[in-house]
Amino acid sequence: MRGADIQQDTLFSTVIPEERVPADHPLRPIREMVNAALKALDADFNALYSDMGRDSIPPEKLLRAQLLMAFYTIRSERQLMEQIDYNLLFRWFVGFSMDDKVWDRSVFSKNRDRLLEGEVSHRFFVQVLSQAEDAELLSKEHFSVDGTLIEALASHKSYRPKDEGGPPGGGGRNPTVDFHGEKRSRDTHESKTDKDAYLFKKSQGSESKLAYLGHILMENRHGLVVRAKVTQATGTAEREAAAELVDALGGTQRITLGADKNYDTKGFVEELREMTVTPHVAKNDTNRSSAIDERTTRHPGYATSQTIRKRIEECFGWAKTIGGLRKSRFIGREKLDFQFVMTFAAYNLIRMRNLGVVSC
């Protein structure tokens, strides 16, 4: 007999998200790792908030919600609030009951900005990584570095002379602007929308964009990201950031660093050697002399580093296609850095789950 298409609501509901999420759901081991990292940050959270006043959104819930944006390619915080409201899985992951009211988007954004003050994203990233270190998943000797272009949340039309006050002429909210023949540089122009963003082209012949550069340092054993940061887009930013990321590792033992041809400059290679880092940098000898010689290339480890360093493109590929890092969600370098670091914390959590750090 055909059943009747009738929706009948019960007077009382006893649905508990914890009971509805399958025991073998892939988010369960991730949530366990996330909660362990958040528990380790309890003292840091206490230092950020006053003992007086109204309760804010718990920082633990804020960070879990930010991770969901990377896991499920959620483009905006408005869409995130909608998903948390009616998606039972999202409610469970964030820590909501079925009856908890979801935050207003503007309240969520304001509370998220508070986390920028204490560099919470970097501290959370470190706590996640410490679990991989405890599981002996990290290489302490072999690393790779690379950078990627992240489009700013600003258009070419916003890039105007610094001494120009008002909007461009032409009328309307989206006036026509002709840049043909106009010489534009960072000395004379800036984005009126995002002053931290620079006009930059990745290579000769490619289009210029208002953008930032995101940099990561990857350990070569399991391809986990161990350091991440965002800088303004300049011609030397990749090499400068690479040196800073390596220096942040600390320690005195010699390590190797794999990198592509963009890092093959005499100054960068010499700087690495002064830091007791063996530069496994791809040779760029097209119409020029390479800074990498046989002292480095004759060792079999050089070829191995050149093969493994290509895994770093998998990190960036996931971050841009799944994690939503193709274009910034925010205005300003500081906020983008928060998004960037949280995205690679999410990437590490997925890798660590797949490597069996926590089993269901």
Image (cartoon, rainbow, N blue to C red):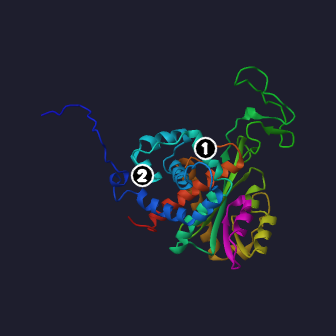
User: Residue at coordinates 66% horizontally, 63% vertically from top-left?
Assistant: 145
Identify the mark at residue 92; answer none if there is no mark. Answer: 2
Q: What element carries label 1?
A: helix
The amino acid sitting under disc 1 is Ser
Residue at image position (74%, 32%) is 157
Q: In which quarter of the image is the N terminus?
A: top left
Instruction: Indicate the position of residue 3 as horizontal and vertical percent values.
Output: 17, 34
Asked whether the beta carbons under mark 1 and mark 2 sit within 8 Å of each other, the answer is no
Residues 5 and 113: in front is: 113
What number is the disc on residue 109?
1
Of the residues shown, which amino acid type is indicated by label 2? Answer: Trp
Whole-angstrom CA distance, mark 1 to mark 2, is 21 Å
Q: Is mark 2 on a helix, strand or loop?
A: helix
Magenta stretch?
241-263
Q: In the shown orientation, is residue 63 left or right of residue 289? A: left
Residue 228, x across and y down, in percent? 65, 59
The C terminus: image quadrant:
bottom left
